[in-house]
Image (cartoon, coloured by chain):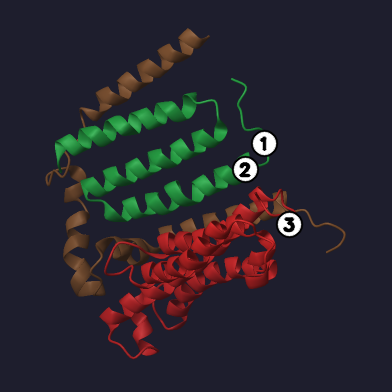
Chain colours: A red, B brown, C green
């Protein structure tokens, strides 16, 4: 981040804005039970922070923080967390995606275990949506070459 | 051609507006959507799942299969976009 | 539900929708579509569907506008028709 970028205003505002956006995205995912929000919206906000980084700096700046391999693996990990939570319920003796049996491994009662199961599922959706949105944006905006500055 | 297109759009719009006259009023407690499963979810959300936000409990718990399908759709879209558009140059 | 606010937002939605398909500049068209999504978000909020409004604001007004701008960057800015 040395003086390759000429626009000081955009650089400074972006550097201040990205941590706030990511914190808000994590809040939306984690607090989706008590207020509007959830995995999809929080994942979109997290992806928007990375897209802002690509637009105002360049793709290399994003790749130094999140490589393409990590991004593609995170796509699959998000769906895996969702399906794995459902499969864990089957292993513990319940139906598929019946979170109340999770109280056997979590230190909560069966009603609160459904809350915890929903939280795990939302985290999975958030990770999947975030990395898929970043991947689609990079592929569309750089013609699939993943280099260049986009300005 | 333009006249025919405008005519078709106006007729379709008129039919849609005419169809909305049969819909129940906004927030009507006696509409079919509010009488079938909605009371069950509204009454059962807090005692059964301890979740204050009803939308999240319906989306992730009662209708978990739908959200699993939705996540799979998004995942498939991302993978297909990667497969169609990504070009790896010789240097990498 | 305030019906004056409702009418105002609905008129603005129709104006944004018509403007986004008639304007010649593709970048302006994408931004008008973002404004349309945001007005729809206001309409959902005003009707009490806050989760739908949040999704509309995050996906419709945020991410899809960014996708459109990223795609317009590799094509011509002006449309032919």
Q: How much space separates mark 1 and mark 2, taking CA atoms? A: 7 Å
Query: Which residue in the protein does label 2 denote?
Result: C71
Picture layout, residue B52 above or below residue C26: below
- Tell me whether circle 3 and circle 1 mark residues in contact (CB < 8 Å): no
Left or right of residue C18, residue B41 in this image: left
Camera sees residue B75: no
Residue occupying image coordinates x 83% and y 57%? B89
In this rendering, the count of numbered labels is: 3
Residue occupying image coordinates x 67% and y 36%? C75
Local secondary structure at mark 3: loop
Disc 1 is attached to a residue of which chain? C
Residue occupying image coordinates x 57% and y 44%? C69
Camera sees residue C4: yes
- Tell me whether circle 1 and circle 2 mark residues in contact (CB < 8 Å): yes
Q: How much space separates mark 3 and mark 2, taking CA atoms? A: 15 Å
Local secondary structure at mark 2: helix
- Tell me whether circle 3 and circle 2 mark residues in contact (CB < 8 Å): no
Left or right of residue B25, residue A21 in this image: right
Image location (x, y in percent) of residue A132: 57, 59
Picture layout, residue A16 above or below residue B39: below
Image location (x, y in percent) of residue A91: 47, 81
Q: Which mark is residue A147?
A: 3
Discs 3, 2: same chain: no
Query: Which residue in the protein does label 1 denote?
Result: C75
For mark 3, does the 10 Å Cα neighbourhood hold few (<14), some (14 to 19), or many (20 or more) residues? some
Picture layout, residue B53 above or below residue C31: below
Q: How much space separates mark 3 and mark 1, taking CA atoms? A: 18 Å
Choose between A80 and C30: the one closer to the eye.
C30
Disc 3 is attached to a residue of which chain? A
């Amino acid at each position: 981040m040395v003086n390759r970028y000429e626009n000081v205003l955009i650089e400074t505002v972006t550097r201040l804005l990205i941590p706030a956006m990511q914190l808000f995205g994590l809040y939306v995912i984690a607090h989706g039970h008590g207020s509007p929000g959830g995995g999809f919206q929080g994942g979109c906000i997290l992806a928007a922070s990375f897209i802002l980084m690509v637009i105002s700096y360049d793709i290399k700046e994003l790749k130094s923080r999140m490589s393409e391999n990590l991004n593609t693996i995170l796509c699959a990990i998000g769906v895996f967390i969702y399906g794995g939570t459902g499969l864990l319920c089957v292993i513990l003796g319940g139906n598929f995606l019946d979170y109340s049996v999770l109280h056997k491994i979590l230190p909560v009662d069966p009603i609160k275990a459904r809350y915890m199961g929903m939280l795990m599922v939302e985290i999975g959706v958030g990770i999947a949506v975030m990395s898929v949105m970043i991947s689609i944006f990079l592929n569309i905006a750089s013609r699939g070459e993943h280099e260049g500055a986009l300005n | 051609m333009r006249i025919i297109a405008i005519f078709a759009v106006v007729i379709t719009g008129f039919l849609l507006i005419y169809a909305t006259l049969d819909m129940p009023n906004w927030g009507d407690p006696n509409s079919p959507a509010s009488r079938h499963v909605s009371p069950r979810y509204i009454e059962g959300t807090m005692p059964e799942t301890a979740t204050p936000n009803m939308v999240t409990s319906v989306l992730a718990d009662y209708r978990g299969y739908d959200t699993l399908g939705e996540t799979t759709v998004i995942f498939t879209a991302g993978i297909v976009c990667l497969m169609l558009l990504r070009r790896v140059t010789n240097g990498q | 539900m305030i019906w004056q606010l409702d009418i105002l937002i609905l008129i603005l939605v129709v104006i944004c929708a018509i403007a986004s398909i008639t304007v010649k500049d593709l970048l302006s068209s994408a931004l008008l579509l973002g404004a349309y999504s945001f007005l729809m978000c206001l309409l959902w909020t005003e009707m009490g569907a806050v989760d739908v409004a949040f999704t509309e604001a995050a996906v419709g007004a945020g991410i899809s506008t960014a996708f459109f701008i990223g795609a317009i960057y590799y094509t011509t800015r002006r449309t032919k028709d």
